[in-house]
Amino acid sequence: MKSMNKQKTIGGVIGLSILIGMLFWVVDGLIDYYKFQDYLRFLIFKGPESILDTMLLNVPGLDLFQRIVFFVTCLISGLLVARFLWKHLESAEALKANEVRYRRLHETMRDAFVQMDMGGRITDFNSAFQQMLSYPQGCLSEMTMTDLTPPKWHSHDLSIVSDQILAEGKSEVYEKEFIRCDGTVFPVELRLFLIRDDNGAPISMWAIVRDITQRKKVEAERERALNALKRSNEDLQQFAYVASHDLQEPLRMVSSYTFLLSERYGELLDGKAKKYIDYAVEGAVRMQTLIQDLLAYSRVDTRGVEFTSVDLNKVFGYAVENLRTLINETQATVTADALPYVTGDETQLVAVFQNLIHNGIKFRGESPPRIHVSAGEENGQWVVEVRDNGIGIDRKYKEKIFIIFQRLHARNEYSGTGIGLALCKRIVERHGGRIWFDSSVGQGTTFFVALLPAENPEGVKREALAAAYSGEL
Amino acid sequence: MGEETMKSVEILLIEDNPGDADLAMDALEHGKLKNNLHVVTNGEAAMDFLRRNAPYEKVPRPDIILLDLNLPKKDGREVLAEIKEDPSLKRIPVVVLTTSEAEEDVLNTYSLHANCYLTKPLHVQQFFKMVQSIENFWLSIVVLPPKGDD
């Protein structure tokens, strides 16, 4: 291409020089009109090689110096004109190449592109845009952007133009809707750019448009699911509260009056009657405890607080304080290594520690209970270990013991409703952690609780999204 | 002091559950102070009693009111509001004794100027202790407002 251009140009230079020379010659000749006729006769009979002769040697009134000046002037003019032409050709080539590239991009790109004048009339668009709006060929060129937009977006569009496009030359990505040829409305996301002329006046705008129907659907789904989850949690909490409240009332009556019966009329009753009453009272009291436990269980998520950085040493301290009486009574030894900071809800973590230590004491063997708490790092998490020297747990129960109200012993052997470990599991899972144990019968038990480390010791708040997304209800 | 200790304390118990009413009565009977317990079982009757409408024309003015929040006809919360808005009734101490432990109820009750809020305990022995505490505090230690213009 370029070498062809060069050749063209050189040819042009020479040709033009000659042309200009001839022009001078003609003009001069015209002054001596009659001499022109002679030259013409001369040309016809003598041929082209003599034109140069004639021009250079026989032009009347010119001496050698003038002829040289004349020739050089023609050459320079020719060069200047050629350069001008060359540049023009080059930029025409470049423009054409750009145009081809642009057109190709324009047609093949999957995002829809549309160009409009300052009045919103569509001046250009690509096939992606046409397909998106599903208008037949030719229709769109007669439409304005306003025609394609549902009325409720019109003022918003106008404010985008004035506030963003005219002010800053472009808009932020924003959402609106378009109307297809068949009348269906669909959501889009677009961004507009302003084109100015050489004086800086706005002459047109263009936009890249994306159909976000799919994305909107997914977002709506997620929104619905989250709301359903939130509602469900609230319903559960409400239900638990109302149920417990309304169940407590008759229970209070049963337990209060059976108690009063045995208290006030004890002398009138024989041993059997007293035993019957005791069973009734015991049943009622147990049910009351069960309801309390169930309420506590249901509140793990709804009454949980935002997570902060929690010092497990403090948590250990609180748990031990709460168990002080039991520890003294059973002469238990409860110790701990230095414990780390974790991300969590301090109150709930105290409940977990307290439950585990309490179990270690409750399910003791012959010797006084010894419980030790330590922590180690594993895969970026803190794993807390609570080890006891108690009666141990058969490994076959490794799932069962975490189920609510499941117990492994008769009521007269060991007290409790069977909610402790279920509660621990629920709390730990809300924290995005895990709880499991290792044990054999007669060999003591170690419970493991994996928790997320604190983000920094100063304390960083974190939503319990982990619980929501782990499917916990 | 002599005459006051011989005089019975008039207690108005507003409670719809007869079981709870009997328990309260039992607890007060075993208490130290002489008292007359009047029981009404719904909110409307409570206001009639306090305003001495029929059939309560001849009742005495209570020295203290024990109020349950969940009542039929007129809710305990409405009764509380009415008592504390009425200039002739608002000085009578109102002890709210209810099963609810909901935070909104506690907040609301104190906002309506109840004198105190008590949640009925689950075990009957604790309930007795509570009633006796009420007796000790409100009827023995506390100086009740004089029965002025009513």
Image (spheres, coloured by chain):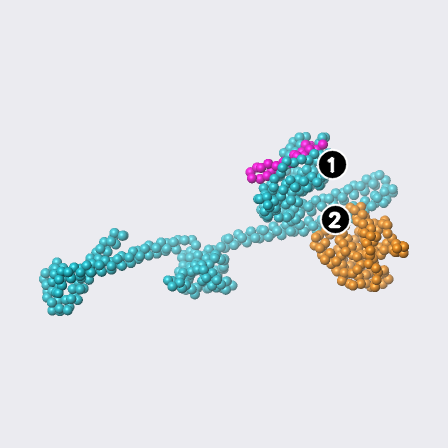
List the residue tagged with mark 2.
A248
Q: Is residue B133 magenta?
A: no
Amino acid type, callout 2:
Gln
- Residue A155 lies, in percent from the top left, at 50, 64
Residue A328 tag number = 1
Which residue shows up at 69% across the image and 39% down it? A320
Labels 2 and 1: the sequence-earlier one: 2
Quadrant occupied by the N terminus of chain B = bottom right
The magenta-colored residue range is: A368-395
- Residue A417 lies, in percent from the top left, at 71, 41
Labels 2, 1: front one: 1
Which residue shows up at 79% across the image and 55% down it? B66
- Residue A366 lies, in percent from the top left, at 72, 30
Chain letter of the orange region:
B
Which residue shows up at 76% across the image and 47% down it? B122
Residue A258 tag number = none
Amino acid type, callout 1:
Asn
Whether callout 2 and callout 1 share a subunit is answered yes
**Nearer to the camera, A77 or A275:** A77
- Residue B123 lies, in percent from the top left, at 78, 46
For this view, does B6 lie left or right of residue B88? right
